[in-house]
Each structure stands twice: as C-alpha cells, then as structure tokens.
Amino acid sequence: MPNILKTPGIVLRNRPFKESSLFCSIFTEKFGKLRLAAKGARRPRSKFCGSLEPFTHVEVIFYKRESKEVYTLSDAVIISDFSGLRNSQNKFIAGQVICEFIDQFTVREEPNRNLYDELLLSLGKIASGDDDIACFWSLLMLFRLLKYAGIEPNLTDCICCHKPVADNTIINFSIGRGGLVCEEDFDESVFKLDKAAFKLLIDSRKGIFPKSCNFKAFLTLRNLFEAYIFYHLNGLSLNSLKLLKY
C-alpha cells in the first residue's frame, strides 16, 4: 500500500508527460526534492490548473511507493504563486537561475530545511524587488547557494598560504583552488576581482543586496560563477545563467 503524504514545496520545473500529464520537480520542506507525476494536469479543466507552474509555492499531497522514483501527485494547493516573477522577463529568468541550480545539484529525497527557506526567501525577494535589479540579485543569491552544494569558496585569506589578501586593490579568485590566492600562489584559473565586486560577495553572505546594478561587477561575477560551477560540479552548465542580462 502506498503512503499518502503532504508537504509544502516549490515547483522548480515541469515537463510534459504523455498526452495530458506533467512530470514535476518540486523542492519540498519535509522531503527535499521530489519527482512527481501529475496525471491529467494539462487538461483544460484539471484540478492542477495553474498550481504546477515554475516558482509556485504549493502544498502537495502525493502517494509514495518505496519501489518508485517518481510518485503520483494527488493534489496541489497554491500557497503563493509569486506572480511578480512572471510579470517581467528579467524576474522570470532570475527565478529560473535559482530553481535550475537547485534542481541540478540536489539529489532526490534529501531534506534540507535551510535550503528550502533560502529558496523561498530568494524567490520572494526577486518577485517583490525592482525589475532592473532582479538579474543582479539572482547572481548574488546563486553565490549564497554554493554552500548548500558543498562548494562555498574561501574569501578570508589565501587558500594556500593563509596570507591576508582581502584588502588588496585587485583580488585574485582561483577557480581551481576554490577561493582567494596571493600573487605567489597565482594560477591560470584566476579571475581578477576589483574591490567593488569582492564587497558584493561579502555583503551577499550577510544578506545585504545592492540597490543598483554595477555593470562591470555583473559581467565579472556572471562569468566567474559560470566557470566556478562548471569546474566544481562536474561540468554543470546552467542554461538560465547564460540568459541573465544587465
């Protein structure tokens, strides 16, 4: 007999299944990431209508069978649809960056309440913020998520010799070594960060986000994160990250 379970969750993505159904990836509060099949969800009068769109915060009821990797979704009730994310292209892409990353690096059924709360906070902040800053914020939120993937970089001192480097005018960030390095430990994977870009990283760890976008820092950090994630997560490339615009 299947277990009938209920939990809040956030829809990370969906894709068509057969003629009228959907496969959904949902990051839940109680169970972590789930793969759920919503039968008949694409029919015009489906009870799931509107509740399984990306970014939607829902309460789901599903049938769990131990022998299955995809469970059957019984019901989904909207808690918040984060409609602000769908009212602008910038915000939609910004939300996609967050959801795509979590969908890609997490494994099935590993609960992480802190990550769940971080996802809710990030989507809510982007949805309620200004359109012009949405993509920039999503980059900094992506940086905050690196710790949950186990690849948080060292930003305190040289990762090799522990020499202080954070006060330098130009700061060396080594992709390969996973953090800051001094001139003596410079390597070919280094990205050069100016003080403004580095301060953005430090502030974002504290939950402080800028009120305006720094174009130079935006380009630097987007390229840095793309390379860093690719290197440390076995060639993972985020399609949505390439779409982020200033």
Image (spheres, grey):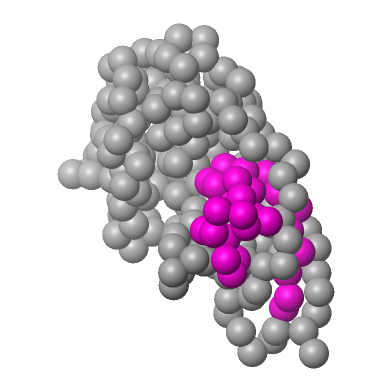
Give yes or no for residue 49 being in the magenta stretch. Answer: yes
Quarter location, residue 205: top right
Side (left or right) of 92 relative to 7: left
Q: Nearer the viewer, residue 164 or 22?
A: 22
Residue at left offset 64%, top offset 37%: 81
Q: Position of residue 238 (x, y in %)?
A: 34, 48
Residue 173 appears in the rendering:
yes
Residue 135 against residue 59 in the figure, above or below: above
Quadrant of the frame with the N terminus: bottom right
Residue 53 against residue 206 in the figure, above or below: below
Q: Nearer the viewer, residue 149 or 79?
A: 79
Q: Position of residue 33 (x, y in %)?
A: 61, 62
Give yes or no for residue 35 being in the magenta stretch. Answer: no
Quarter location, residue 111: bottom right
Q: Position of residue 28 (x, y in %)?
A: 69, 56
Residue 202 appears in the rendering:
no
Q: Which residues are magenta?
A: 38-64
Residue 132 against residue 237 in the figure, above or below: above
Residue at left offset 32%, top offset 20%: 246
Side (left or right) of 240 relative to 38: left
Side (left or right) of 82 relative to 245: right
